[in-house]
Image: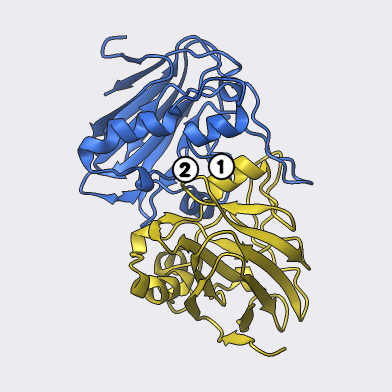
Chain colours: A yellow, B blue
Amino acid sequence: MSGIVEIPPRSGTAFELAAGELLAVIDPQGTQVADLLAYARADVREAISNGRTFDYEETVRLTAGNRLWSNRSNPMLTIVEDDVGSHDFLLTPCSEATFRHFYPEHPVHRGCFGNLAEALAPWGVEPDMIPCAFNVFMNVPVDANTGKVSVLPPLSKPGDRLVLRAEMDLVIGLTACSAYASNGGSFKPIHYRVG
Amino acid sequence: MSGIVEIPPRSGTAFELAAGELLAVIDPQGTQVADLLAYARADVREAISNGRTFDYEETVRLTAGNRLWSNRSNPMLTIVEDDVGSHDFLLTPCSEATFRHFYPEHPVHRGCFGNLAEALAPWGVEPDMIPCAFNVFMNVPVDANTGKVSVLPPLSKPGDRLVLRAEMDLVIGLTACSAYASNGGSFKPIHYRVG
């Protein structure tokens, strides 16, 4: 288990991931979401895109074997292991505005959006360049009849992992998500390992 | 019917829409998609966002009464009339890369992506600033069990309209979509009117 890095609750980080390297995202306690962003190391204007991914993978339910694509139609990451099988790519990172909207009874938090913006700034990523994240372990069923989107507690159990392989040199943003509904009402750390 | 502008088949345009103005997108022949983008006139780094919209509207099926939100969590457009009730906000504009991927037997076309990029360039919108479009009349059911996304012929009949009200000063990009599957296999014009 060497090389594991902990992302404390309600925080985020960023790091480089070289082509061919594996990134394991681990939920050490269970029921915790991690928002994941990816940018091309060579030019951060190339970024992960939910729309291109849904188009090329022909599904909104992404799991082992699926690839995550960029806005320039290049594969950025391939999912190589998935203990959970339930992740979200529909919704944007929680932010001050989403806290005011969904949780008026709670203190405002900068959320994954603020955490990602700070962590990614050294690579030249500006806040407006943050697209929909791939929300690892997030449980967002869509009602086929009405289109209604629900945010339910994650299905991840302690130690569950998602492993992705980089298909190009990347800058990764990764969080331990800060929103109440997304994480079953409590905030836990996320672990990751690069190898 | 004065003030109607025609977008020829497989082309696109861009124009400004002031706060409070109405934009009617009309399918004159039926079974034709129009990709719609919106940017804040004051700062085009603020752009329409499928993820923020799904989050705040709590649905992927957007119709009269729903708002389309920006990446900065501001409402950009409100849908005020909808003759069809079937639109897509999951998929990105068709492009040279999607033509090579999905239609290897057909000539490559620059698609809605290329048409939008050219039309929006005078406002400072660069190709990497093109997010998922709101694909008016596009018929993309999602299988609730598998997550599979299908692209079916649009349900729009001749003369069907979608009317949106601008909630801020906007730059709009709008196309008559160029992809085979999205338009039931043939390419028709789109009409629009601002008022």
**In what element is the residue under mark 2?**
loop
Label 1 close to label 2 by CB (< 8 Å): yes
* In this picture, residue A184 sits left or right of residue B18: right
Tell me the number on the disc at residue B132: 2
Tell me the number on the disc at residue B90: 1
Please rate how many residues cluster around mark 2, counting C-alpha atoms within 10 Å: few if below 14, some from 14 to 19, many from 20.
many
Q: Residue at x 40, y 23 (%)?
A: B25
Question: Share a chain, discs 1 and 2?
Answer: yes
Q: Residue at x 70, y 75 (%)?
A: A31
Q: Is residue A42 above or below residue B100?
A: below
Q: Is residue A86 above or below residue B64?
A: below
- Give the amino acid at mark 2: Cys
The quarter of the displayed image where residue A116 is located:
bottom left
**In what element is the residue under mark 1?**
loop
- Locate the N terminus of chain A and report the quarter of the image it occupies: bottom right
Q: Residue at x 23, y 33 (%)?
A: B16
